[in-house]
Amino acid sequence: MLRKTWVVLGAVALITITHIAAFAIEDVQKRVVEGGIEPSNGDPCRLFGDPAEYSAGETPISVAVGDFDDDGVQDLAVTNQGSTTCVGCYPSHVSVLLGLGDGSFGEEDLFGVGRGPISIAVEDLDNDGVQDLAVANRYSYDVSILMGLGDGRFSGETRFDLWNAAATQSIAVGDFDRDGMADLVTANQYSGDVQLLRGDGHGWFDVYTRYEVGYPYSIAVGDFDNDGVQDLAVGGFGSPSQISVLFGLGNGFFGAEQGFDIEGQPMSIAIGDFDSDGVQDLAVAAWRSVAVLMGLGDGTFSEALYYDPGQPGDAERSLAIGDFNGDMVQDLAVIQDSDYVFVLFGLGDGSFGEEQGFRVGERPRSVAVGDFNGDGAQDLAVTNAFNDTVSVLINQCATLAVDIDIKPHSHPHSINPRSRGVIPVAILGSDTLDVADVDEVTLRFGPGAAPIAHRHGHLEDVNCDGIMDLMLHFRTHDTGIACGDESVTLTGETLDGQPFAGTDSIQTVGCREVKQPAIWMKDHDTPDAMRRGGPVNIERE
């Protein structure tokens, strides 16, 4: 009997589902959480607002992030599969949209590739310091290479045939023979194999090895047994569907596969570390759920946990990993056929808690993570197959950097950690922060996360710049400031949920070692005259 644990988000109910098969009865426990797409954790900051839509060719499928014009701003590359009613009747392309640095993108440029481009990878394939594109073509059963020119343009494609492949579905980049040159691997669904194309470091590739894996649909590169050699995780359709792990030998070959059964169909695989133990874990978009398999460090994985974001039963097609709320814990962004992208927030122990959902275009197919406006917060790009667009969602919860002044008009900012008093702190207003919008309930100061000492701060122009500042006080013993600390940070949010943080320098004082006074013990047997002289031995009763 095989037990599967399902986790979806909201109010909890426990359901036991019994599957009757020809040879066995399987009891599957499902932890179902009823919930909508609104956050239920009380967090006022919704990650993303309404998406911006950009034309991205005909039937955009896969999206990848790179910097194709070397301007330090992230760009997008999107595969266009062509007509949805007549595959191959129209030219297939890759659309490249150059980022403008403010979260927006310019018009697309089209570059021809093979028929039915469905998966794309970004890498410097010829070691010239410029990013190139590798594209898997589902209906011409081959790989297209577009060499970057460094200005946002690409050279004409070079096509590389595969060996008797059918339905080339996914592509990934690695260095499987450890020669420092990029290699490619493809998952070919109908021919039931994975093929490795060995790179020569100049943009040329040849099929080097081939491995039979049952109906592979998705592929990812990692190191699952911590031996320093790259391995493959391959999602294969079948009965049952499974994740096959092929362990790299470091010479361009792989050892025998090891399979891990999952519920559903593995449409997309992402590799992360969801419990911060230094061991790689797997997240799988498994058609009707998201499966999370925790790595054990020896190439094996724990039994999958299942999550069903949004509306139960909608198909999960693609996912990506990021830290969207800035808590240093990895989260998941999941594409669903309901025209939504859902973010599942990681809890740091390998499990996921609350969700937020965001509407995108019609029939989203792929999601990628980037920082498109350079604010340090992770944004999303989503392809929409039915309305020929890519949706860009800009993270609204980036932490705003603000200026604070600890003990205004004093320098250095001396603080005695042993004081029983309060520390005055000013949040300085600016063009980007109106201090009247500060939510004082959210303010925390110092390592001890001290709240404000009084119910409210007061407004005054502390630095005489003509902009009002917010004057606050914090109890010293609540701040957690310790002797030797050289700076202190204040965090908080605005009334509309925008997080902010500011740091100022300090100098701790009063930190010399305090000598304890001598303790006299009453000793009725020793004369006073002797007690005032040299050392006196006193015995405790």
Image: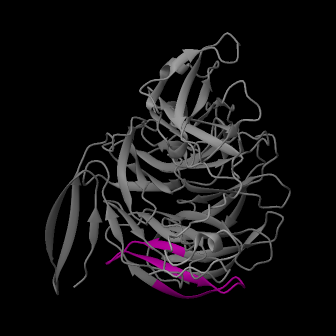
Residue beneath the point at 21% across and 66% down: 30
Residue segment shown in magenta: 233-258
Q: Quadrant of residue 137?
A: bottom right
Rendering coords of residue 157 (x, y %) = 73, 53
Judge whether residue 66 can be spotted in this image: yes
The overriding secondary structure of the stretch rendered in magenta is strand
Q: Residue 38 magenta-drawn?
A: no
Instruction: Assign the C terminus to one quadrant of the image.
Output: bottom left
**Drawn side of residue 108 relative to residue 54, left or right:** right
**Drawn side of residue 123 relative to residue 92, left or right:** right
Q: Is residue 534 above or below residue 24?
A: above
The foreground one among 27 and 147 is: 27
- What is the count of numbered marks? 0
Q: Quadrant of residue 152?
A: top right
Q: Is residue 244 above or below residue 217?
A: below
Residue beneath the point at 84% across and 61% down: 127
Rendering coords of residue 52 (x, y %) = 51, 30
